[in-house]
Image: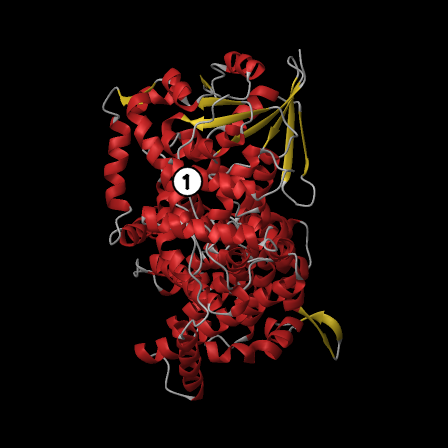
């Protein structure tokens, strides 16, 4: 059997990777494409002795990202024998647009009509023979996930030949224009590639405009033909070509596809989407869902379990058990203090919130897996575009609600470099799982009856992302068009119980492991420095107010005086929180003596916090600084790798710290003044100046604003 190299191409989420795995099994290896850090995945179909190159998924051959450039360049090369184009049968109209871009290249091609097992459920019937006739290439119905039709697909690939007649979707006048431009490109390019390059030039493709910028004859012809298209067809060339493809698809769809049933599931999803993605209702619905989730997790179900964990499990069982064991071992006072005050008091204060986090993660997993969160990305795309981002940026931000590290790594899929930079800076602005204990601690201590406070924090996070995008995009350093964002809205479905439980378990497991390692080590160090110091009698245990940590905290506490928490315990907690956000709760528990003095007075962490924070607005300012300052050290490491530049990394760290400080200053000084909790003073004046500067940066005229190039794209239900 002849050796072949197959170029596997298709939209994102079309089942391309599933098909690749089904065809190649374990016979795969991963490398890098020359000159870029994009993964190159190649597999071998052993029984056919064929190589399969899994190209990065894309929606169009107009390149915006490194992945799209890689896919396009490979398709234009002669390094393969057959194009295997994977098409999502359930979203045929969207998928065929890419197919119609590849066809003019004139290479042997087979279409794998994937996900045909889902057509009946959606009430759709597709005639593969008719589709093959319309496109002039072989179409094989398959289900990659079930393995159906794979043998027939391999047979079709083996017989694939270049079509004698290439399907054209453009009128003769446009075909003549492409032929004219192609004739100016020289003899070193084949006719199919000439047609593709000509189409790209007419669409103002930056790659080819740069390549042919020295050829005045070619550029003159391109300008002339673009003007003709605009005059004759009433639209610019960028919109004309994709629209022409969709017009062709619309024309053939009635002949190749029909509804065989009601498609009840899709219809129900569409009706729900009419409400949850509504221009005016989308954000209120999102806020309401977050409100209900946090109400159940923080105020009702989760709180009862957390109170039991704090008061009984750690407050009585662990403390009493540890004291009994230490009594039996005749342990010295320092060891008793380390175990009870340091380990149980610090780590226990963090683990005490695990019941609430179980409820929270469980509810969030249901919302994510039922398909709602993809709607949030769709809704926020409309909003994000107004300040220089796209819905693509919401994906890392959504991942960051679990952990910022994978979220920051996922920004590599954002093709626009400045959009990626802004996303890296703002990704951690929505609370991750590590910040949830701090939120819960402050909510329960100072806002136990204000159930609106959790949605307010999330909306403030979205607001912070928005204003950061607006401010930075008005700077010349961040000037670049927003990249197009195409996404699929899957039908709603009931989440599988096993998947929800597994997701909840994995998130809680990661949190508990972190509590048992990083937080354990931190609270031990905090305990040591908060209980020892050099005195006239030598190095020995002292009262916490006379410890080394107290001295250090007192040195830096003045920094936070304008923010309302200028006492040394809070200052130390902020510093440890820069290492890992979970440390904030454990640090406060250790420094406030939660396991000893506080417990003896029948008080808890809430009472201890109320004793040191002067007002509730000061506590909220403390929360704001910890939520919107830099993420943990591990996340900063991921951020630095993604930036690939020390200068940009340094700027992002400085921006986040400054933003968090200024936001906390405004919250405490102006918010406190409005609520009557803070008197007017010099720092209030500073807060108003900061607010004025902020408003100027936000609303100043953007004189260098560029128009945004958007490629027409469409999804179907």
Quadrant containing the C terminus is top left
Report the side of 260 relative to 381 (left or right): left
Color scheme of the displayed model: secondary structure
Q: Is residue 35 left or right of residue 237?
A: right
Q: What residue appears at the point 56 percent right and 74 percent down from the top-left corner?
A: 568
Rate crowding at label 1 as few (under 14), some (14 to 19) or many (20 or more) other CA atoms within 10 Å. some
Q: Residue at x 59, y 67 (%)?
A: 651
Residue nearer the viewer, 425 or 49: 49
Q: Is residue 91 visible?
A: yes
The residue carrying mark 1 is: 174
* Residue 443 x, y percent position in the rendering: 38, 60
The residue at 63%/68% (across/down) is 530
Name the spot of residue 251 as percent of width and height, x first. Answer: 31, 30
Compared with residue 483, is residue 154 higher up or lower down, i.e. above or below? above
Q: Is residue 186 above or below residue 331?
A: above
- Residue 148 or residue 91, whichever sits in front: 91
For the N terminus, give its image quadrant.
Answer: top right
In the image: residue 83, left or right of residue 401: right
Q: Element at badge 1? A: helix
Q: Is residue 405 visible?
A: no
Report x, y in % for residue 206.
54, 52
């Amino acid at each position: 059997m002849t050796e072949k190299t197959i170029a596997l191409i298709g939209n994102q989420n079309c089942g391309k990777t599933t098909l690749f795995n089904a065809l190649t099994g374990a016979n795969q290896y991963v490398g890098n494409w020359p000159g870029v850090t994009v993964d190159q995945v190649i597999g071998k179909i052993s029984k056919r002795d064929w190589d399969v190159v899994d190209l990065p998924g894309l929606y169009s051959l107009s390149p915006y990202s490194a992945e799209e450039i890689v896919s396009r360049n490979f398709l234009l090369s002669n390094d393969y024998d057959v194009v295997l184009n994977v098409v999502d049968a359930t979203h045929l109209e969207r998928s065929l647009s890419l197919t119609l871009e590849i066809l003019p290249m004139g290479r042997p091609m087979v279409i794998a009509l994937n996900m045909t097992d889902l057509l009946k459920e959606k009430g759709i019937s597709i005639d593969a023979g008719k589709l093959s006739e319309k496109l002039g290439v072989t179409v094989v119905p398959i289900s990659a996930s079930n393995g159906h039709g794979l043998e027939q697909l391999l047979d079709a690939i083996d017989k694939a030949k270049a079509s004698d007649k290439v399907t054209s979707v453009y009128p003769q006048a446009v075909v003549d224009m492409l032929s004219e431009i192609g004739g100016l490109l020289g003899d070193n390019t084949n006719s199919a590639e000439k047609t593709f390059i000509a189409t790209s030039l007419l669409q103002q493709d930056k790659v080819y405009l740069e390549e042919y910028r020295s050829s005045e004859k070619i550029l003159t012809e391109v300008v002339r033909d673009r003007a003709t298209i605009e005059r004759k067809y009433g639209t610019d060339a960028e919109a004309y070509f994709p629209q022409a493809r969709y017009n062709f698809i619309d024309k053939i769809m009635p002949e190749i596809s029909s509804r065989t049933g009601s498609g009840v599931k899709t219809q129900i999803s569409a009706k729900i989407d009419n409400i949850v993605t509504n221009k005016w209702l989308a954000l209120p619905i999102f806020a309401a869902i977050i409100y209900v989730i946090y109400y159940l997790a923080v105020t009702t179900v989760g709180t009862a379990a957390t109170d039991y964990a704090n008061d009984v499990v750690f407050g009585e069982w662990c403390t009493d058990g540890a004291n009994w064991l230490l009594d039996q071992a005749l342990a010295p006072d320092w060891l008793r203090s380390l175990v009870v005050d340091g380990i149980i008091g610090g780590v226990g204060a963090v683990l005490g919130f695990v019941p609430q986090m179980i409820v929270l993660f469980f509810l969030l997993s249901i919302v994510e897996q039922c398909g709602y969160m993809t709607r949030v990305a769709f809704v926020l795309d409309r909003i994000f575009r107004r300040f220089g981002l796209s819905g693509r940026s919401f994906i890392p931000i959504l991942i960051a609600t679990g952990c910022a590290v994978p979220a920051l790594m996922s920004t590599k899929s954002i093709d626009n470099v400045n959009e990626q930079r802004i996303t890296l800076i703002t990704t951690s602005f929505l609370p991750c799982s590590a910040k949830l204990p701090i939120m819960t601690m402050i909510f329960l201590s100072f806002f136990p009856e204000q159930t609106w406070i959790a949605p307010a924090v999330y909306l403030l996070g979205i607001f912070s992302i928005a204003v950061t995008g607006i401010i930075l995009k008005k700077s010349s350093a961040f000037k670049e068009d927003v990249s197009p964002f195409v996404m699929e809205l899957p039908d709603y479905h009931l989440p599988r119980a096993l998947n929800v439980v597994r997701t909840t378990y994995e998130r809680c497991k990661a949190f508990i492991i972190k509590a048992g390692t990083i937080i354990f080590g931190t609270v031990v160090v905090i305990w040591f420095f908060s209980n020892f110091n050099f005195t006239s009698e030598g190095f020995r245990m002292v009262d916490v107010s006379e410890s080394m940590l107290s001295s250090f905290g007192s040195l830096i506490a003045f920094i936070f005086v304008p923010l309302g928490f200028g006492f040394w315990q809070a200052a130390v907690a902020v510093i440890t929180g820069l290492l890992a956000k979970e440390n904030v709760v454990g640090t406060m528990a250790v420094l406030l003596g939660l396991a000893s003095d506080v417990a003896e007075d029948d008080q808890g962490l809430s009472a201890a916090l109320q004793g040191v924070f002067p007002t509730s607005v000061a506590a909220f300012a403390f929360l704001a600084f910890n939520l919107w300052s830099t993420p943990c050290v591990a996340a900063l490491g991921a951020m630095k790798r993604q930036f690939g530049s020390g200068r940009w990394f340094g700027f992002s760290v400085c921006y986040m710290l400054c933003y968090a400080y200024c936001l906390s200053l405004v919250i405490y000084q102006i918010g406190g003044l409005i609520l009557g909790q803070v008197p007017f003073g010099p720092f209030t004046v500073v807060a108003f100046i900061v607010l004025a500067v902020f408003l100027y940066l936000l609303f100043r005229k953007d004189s260098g604003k560029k128009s945004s190039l958007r490629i027409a794209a469409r999804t179907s239900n």
